[in-house]
Image (tube, rainbow, N blue to C red):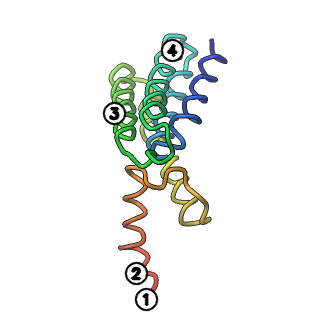
Amino acid sequence: MRFSTLALILFFYIVGLVPRVDFIIGSGLLITALIFGYHGGRSDRMILVTLIVAIAGLYAFAAHLPRSEWKAHDDDWVALALWFGLTLWVLATNRKDRVARAIPIIAILAPTLLVLAMAFGFRQNVPNRSGLLFSQIEYHYFVNIKPLWSR
């Protein structure tokens, strides 16, 4: 069960979410799903998070199959809504679990710091630069922050 659900989650993340959905949103959904789904070893959680990531990945893949459509944002919104819903579910059903309370913090900070380091620190390519969140970060970096350093 564990191996199969992990394989499906990674498949939908790599094939559906990484190339088409904003990196921060897709990775935040993945981190939330992996921590919540596999903390405690409960099979019902594993199946739930697999379905959520599969829905997001399938939608992104099916709705925007050609590369020319990868800049559309409706798949970002679907993945963001699923991530937000899963996060609310985690917090509502596990109020006393310290790990559950840390999931949103980790799921937001880890991909955001990674993408910032990749894009602006190491000048590496970021998957789906035109994504919903990263495009705003990149815009504000080049328009508002970088000119302050250039003076």
Which mark identifies residue 81? 3
Front-most of residues 13 and 32: 13
Q: CA distance from mark 1 to mark 2?
A: 6 Å
> Residue 123, relative to residue 67: is it above or below?
below
Q: Which residue is mark 4?
A: 47
Front-most of residues 85 and 103: 85
User: Considering the numbered disc 4 on the image, is that residue within a helix, a strand or a loop?
Assistant: helix
Q: Which residue is mark 1?
A: 151
> Residue 42, relative to residue 65: is it above or below?
above
Q: CA distance from mark 4 to mark 3?
A: 19 Å
- The single residue placed furthest to the right in the displayed view is 3
| Image point (49%, 28%), residue name | 33
> Residue 65, relative to residue 124: is it above or below?
above
Q: Which residue is mark 2?
A: 148
> Residue 59, relative to residue 1: is it above or below?
below
Q: CA distance from mark 1 to mark 3?
A: 40 Å
Q: Mark 1 or 3 closer to N-term?
A: 3
Evaluate if marks 1 and 2 touch, with contact meaning CB atoms under 8 Å apart.
yes
Where is residue 55, by image quadrant? top left
